Image (cartoon, rainbow, N blue to C red):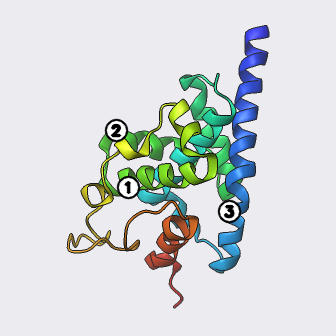
Amino acid sequence: MLRWVVTMAEVRRGRRAAVTTIGPLVERSRVSLNGIPDIAWRDPYLVGFMLTLITIVARVESRNLQDHDLGVVQSQAWGAITGMDADLIGEDALTLSNSHPREFQYGCYSATMVASRLCGPAALASIGYEPWQEATPAEVYPFNGNGDDSSMASISGPVTGNWTDTFEAFVAALPSAKLP
């Protein structure tokens, strides 16, 4: 019983850290972008980006969080941040984690850059995330998401760790975000 209470406290602390850190950034983006379409949250790039960012923020705050409890933190935080049904992300996360599409990998990479700015490089290194060891953006995402591998797409230039470059620019470039 005591172990369960400690585990739930770690899950709660990790979820709360992710929601209070990432939630305001998303809300600012909702205002800036005039809303974020629901379909955007299931895009492979955003799934990788959000789940990796949630994971890093949660692990920095709650270092004793076990891997098997991380799925609960991810789904609850993702639901709270996006306003979507938390049950939707589980299958997407498993499918994309196993198939490793480039968009998903680039979203994960971009999230490590943002997390480095939010939490500091030392905090990331202390939990085993070292973005400088990741593949470069051109290796991970050398196409525009439309099947045309000729350009780097919705996010131009190197990943800087800037929220606007890695999140808002991507969402704004999605076809579902365009006004009719």
Q: Quadrant of the N terminus?
A: top right
Find the distance from the CA under tag 3 to the CA under tag 2.
28 Å
Label annotation for residue 106: 1
- Of 13 and 175, nearer the camera is 13
Residue ID for mark 2: 98
Q: Residue at x 24, y 69 (%)?
A: 147
Instruction: Please state the horizontal and vertical placement of residue 129, each as a whole percent of the image.
Output: 47, 37
Badge 1 crowding class, 10 Å Cα cut-off, few under 14, some 14 to 19, many 20 or more, is many
Find the distance from the CA under tag 2 to the CA under tag 1.
15 Å
Q: Residue at x 50, y 52 (%)?
A: 111
Q: Residue at x 71, y 20 (%)?
A: 7
Residue 121 showing in the rendered view: yes
Instruction: Please state the horizontal and vertical placement of residue 81, each as a whole percent of the image.
Output: 68, 54
Circles 3, 2 touching at the beta carbon (< 8 Å): no
- Does 71 sit above or below residue 165? above
Instruction: Please state the horizontal and vertical placement of residue 70, each as a whole percent of the image.
Output: 58, 31
Front disc: 3 or 2: 3
- Does 71 sit above or below residue 68? below
Find the distance from the CA under tag 1 to the CA under tag 3.
20 Å
Instruction: Please state the horizontal and vertical placement of residue 142, each as a whole percent of the image.
Output: 26, 64
> Label 2 sits on what residue type?
Asn
> Label 3 sits on what residue type?
Leu
Q: Secondary structure at mark 2?
A: helix
Badge 2 crowding class, 10 Å Cα cut-off, few under 14, some 14 to 19, many 20 or more, is few
- Does 58 sit above or below residue 10? below
Residue ID for mark 3: 25
> Label 1 sits on what residue type?
Tyr
Q: Is residue 65 left or right of residue 166?
A: right
Badge 3 crowding class, 10 Å Cα cut-off, few under 14, some 14 to 19, many 20 or more, is some
Along the polypeptide, which appears first: circle 3 or circle 2? 3
Q: Secondary structure at mark 1?
A: helix
